[in-house]
Structures are given as C-alpha cells and as structure tokens.
Image (cartoon, rainbow, N blue to C red):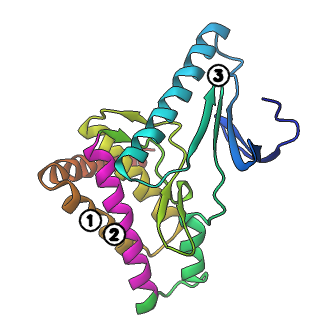
C-alpha cells in the first residue's frame, strides 16, 4: 500500500498512524516501522507477530461484542482499520472537568458512570483472555452520540494472560488516569468495583494481584 497520499496523524515509539481512504471508506492505517537496532530477520518476524496479535485481538473483541475499530485488512507491517471520529476518554474527561480542580456532583456522576463502563468492558476482556497491554484513557474512545466506548490500540496486547498480566492492565490504567486527571481517584474506584462485579471470584484475585503490583511500584519510586 502506498501511504504517500495518506495524512500522518501521529507517530509513537512503535508505529505511525495515518488517515486515508481504503476501498471507498475512511480508514486509519497503523504502520509498525522497523527497528534498526534489531537484526533484520528478527525485526521482520517480530513485526509480523505483533500485527497478527493485534488483528486477532480486534477480531476476538468483535466476537465478544466489545466495540473496537472494524479491521479491514492486515498485511505485513500494516493494519487497516475503520476511522472513528470520536474524542478519547482523556479528552472527554478533560471536557467534563473543564480544567477545574474542584469537582461538582454532576461531574462526579458522569465520570463515575464512565468508570463503571470501562471496568465492565475490561472485565469482559480479561474474562475471555484478552490483555490490552497499554490501557490508558488515550486508548479508549467515547462515541459522542451514543456515549458507547471503543477500545483501541492493542499493539502490546496478547491472549490468555495471567493474573499478573491482568493486574498490570489495571495498574497501568490507574497510573494513566491519576497522572492525566488529578482528583479522579473516585473514578478508578468505580472502575475497580465494576471490574470485580464482572469477574466475580476471579476479579478479587486480580485486584489482589494489582494491589501487590501497586506496592512494588511504590517501593521502586521510594528507592528511586
């Protein structure tokens, strides 16, 4: 695919994201670029494995009824997906808070509801063995008309994750939420509550593991 006519939206450490048209439909293309420090054969193999893993995660989410971008095609280092013109949860939360330090009752109610929805979807992912790997508020979209959530960027994801992997998903989400949106601890509590309800007994095990991971993170921070 010739990406020269596509618009570069952003570039991260692992991939470039383009916007364009594929078979008459608006799309985004995720290009995983090569890493020069790796042996070419190893780099090619790892890139293909990552593309396949992300494609499998998107397809599995669809079968579970979890909203993700529609996958149009996957080839070599490229994923071609549906373009969704939606704000991220990060932007949505900022809009709700309106850059204020004090949070009123209405704002608390909106964000608590959002937290419950995130927790329920994450529980469904984990119940079916899908680990996101980079779960932040920037990797969740909020559809403006319906309010439904769409999870994106499973580039670091994998299947059949351990309790540790699931706990790390929770820990990464908490760190991303609190660092980007101060004074929203109540929202993460809502996420945890809905998550445990969705996973029942297994949810308690994962939350216990998350708390262990959290303590390890604090110790590393204290030690420096």
Q: Are marks 1 and 2 in contact (CB under 8 Å)?
A: yes
Whether residue 216 is visible to the viewer of this picture, yes or no, is no
For discs 3 and 1, the disc positioned in front in the rendered view: 3
Q: Is residue 1 left or right of residue 94?
A: right
Residue 149's disc is: none
Q: Is residue 12 left or right of residue 224?
A: right
Per the rendered image, the range of residues in magenta is 107-128
Q: Is residue 206 above or below residue 147?
A: above
Q: Is residue 117 above or below residue 165?
A: below
Q: Position of residue 220 (x, y in %)?
A: 39, 44
Whether residue 51 is visible to the viewer of this picture, yes or no, is yes
Asked whether 133 falls inside the magenta stretch, the response is no
The residue depicted at 23 percent of the width and 53 percent of the height is 207
For marks 3 and 1 on the same chain, the one whose residue lies earlier in the sequence: 3
Residue indicated by mark 3: 76
Report the number of numbered marks: 3
Q: CA distance from mark 2 to mark 3?
A: 37 Å
Q: Are marks 3 and 1 in contact (CB under 8 Å)?
A: no
Q: Is residue 139 left or right of residue 129?
A: right
Q: CA distance from mark 1 to mark 2?
A: 5 Å
Q: Quadrant of residue 91?
A: bottom right
Q: Give neighbour class at mark 3: few <14, some 14-19, many 20+ (Cα, 10 Å).
A: some
Residue indicated by mark 2: 116
> Looking at this rendering, what residue extends furthest in the left direction?
201
Residue indicated by mark 1: 194
Q: Could you say which is closer to the camera, residue 107 or residue 224?
A: 107
Q: CA distance from mark 3 to mark 1?
A: 38 Å
Asked whether 108 falls inside the magenta stretch, the response is yes
Q: Give neighbour class at mark 2: few <14, some 14-19, many 20+ (Cα, 10 Å).
A: many
């Amino acid at each position: 695919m010739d990406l020269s006519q596509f618009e570069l939206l952003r570039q991260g450490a692992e991939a470039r994201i383009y916007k364009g048209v594929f078979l008459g439909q608006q799309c985004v293309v995720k290009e995983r670029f090569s890493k020069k420090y790796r042996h070419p054969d190893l780099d090619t193999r790892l890139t293909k494995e990552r593309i396949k893993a992300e494609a499998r995660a998107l397809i599995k989410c669809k079968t579970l009824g979890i909203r993700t971008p529609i996958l149009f095609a996957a080839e070599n280092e490229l994923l071609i997906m549906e373009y969704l013109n939606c704000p991220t949860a990060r932007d949505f939360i900022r809009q709700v808070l309106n850059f204020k330090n004090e949070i009123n009752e209405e704002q608390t109610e909106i964000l608590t509801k959002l937290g419950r929805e995130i927790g329920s979807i994450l529980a469904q992912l984990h119940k079916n063995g899908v680990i996101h790997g980079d779960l932040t508020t920037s990797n969740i979209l909020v559809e403006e008309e319906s309010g439904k959530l769409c999870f994106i960027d499973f580039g670091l994801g994998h299947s059949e994750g351990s309790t540790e992997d699931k706990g790390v998903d929770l820990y990464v989400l908490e760190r991303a939420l609190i660092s980007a949106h101060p004074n929203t601890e109540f929202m993460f509590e809502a996420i945890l509550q809905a998550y445990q309800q969705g996973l029942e007994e297994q949810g308690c095990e994962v939350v216990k593991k998350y708390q262990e991971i959290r303590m390890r993170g604090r110790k590393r921070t204290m030690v420096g």
